[in-house]
C-alpha cells in the first residue's frame, strides 16, 4: 500500500525558510518520479516541482524557481522541499506525490507565511 506522509510545515515570517519532508513506503521509491504540489483552499491545485527517480532532473514552477529546491534520498525513501524567501502567497497546504498511473498524494502539511 502506497503511503506518503509530509512533515515540516508551520508558521514562518515573510522572508523565512522551511524544509518540508515526505516519508514514503509501499512502492519502489528509487524508480519513481516524485513531485510537490500545493493548494490554497478554494483554489486549484498548483504543481510546484518534480524530481526524476535518480534526482538528476528537476523542474520547478515559475512561481518558486530560484527559491525552492527539491531533493530526494533514495536510501531513506524520502523527498524534500527546501523553501527560502517565503512570502504570504506561498501559504498553502503542501503535498508530496508519487507520479504513477495515477497521482497519489499524502495528507499534506500546512505552510503559513505571515508576520
Image (cartoon, rainbow, N blue to C red):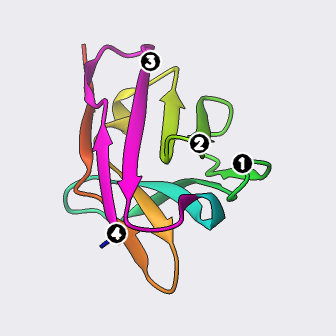
Q: Residues within 10 Å of mark 4 (few under 14, many from 20)?
A: few
Vertical placement of 109 versus 2: above or below? above
What residue sits right under mark 2 in the picture? 72
Mark 1, Cα crowd under 10 Å, few <14 / some 14-19 / many 20+, is: some
Mark 4 or mark 1, which is nearer to you? 4
CB atoms at circles 4 and 2 under 8 Å apart? Answer: no
- Cα–Cα span, label 4 and label 1: 20 Å
- Magenta-drawn segment: 2-29
Kindly indicate whether the residue at mark 1 contacts the one at mark 2 (C-beta within 8 angstroms).
yes
In this image, 56 relative to 93: left or right? right
Above or below — where is 16 with respect to 19? above
Query: Gap between marks 3 and 1, in whole Å?
Result: 22 Å
Q: Nearer the viewer, residue 13 or 105?
A: 105
Question: Spatial distance from mark 4 to mark 2, Cα to Cα?
Answer: 17 Å
Asked if disc 4 and disc 1 are in contact, CB closer than 8 Å, the reply is: no
Of marks 4 and 2, which one's residue comes earlier in the chain? 4
**Circle nearer the N terminus (4, 3):** 4
Task: Please name whichever residue, 31 or 62, is drawn nearer the observer in this view of the structure.
Answer: 31
Q: Nearer the viewer, mark 3 or mark 1?
A: 1
The residue identified by callout 3 is: 17
The residue tagged 4 is 2
Q: Residue at x 51, y 20 (%)?
A: 85
Amino acid at each position: 500500500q502506497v503511503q506518503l506522509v509530509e512533515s515540516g510545515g508551520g508558521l514562518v515570517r515573510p522572508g523565512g525558510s522551511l524544509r518540508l519532508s515526505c516519508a514514503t513506503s509501499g512502492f519502489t521509491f528509487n524508480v519513481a518520479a516524485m513531485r510537490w504540489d500545493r493548494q490554497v483552499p478554494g483554489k486549484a491545485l498548483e504543481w510546484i516541482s518534480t524530481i526524476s527517480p535518480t534526482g538528476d532532473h528537476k523542474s520547478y514552477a515559475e512561481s518558486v524557481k530560484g527559491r525552492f529546491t527539491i531533493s530526494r534520498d533514495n536510501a531513506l525513501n524520502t523527498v524534500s522541499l527546501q523553501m527560502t524567501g517565503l512570502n504570504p502567497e506561498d501559504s498553502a497546504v503542501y503535498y508530496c506525490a508519487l507520479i504513477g498511473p495515477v497521482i497519489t498524494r499524502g495528507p499534506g502539511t500546512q505552510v503559513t507565511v505571515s508576520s
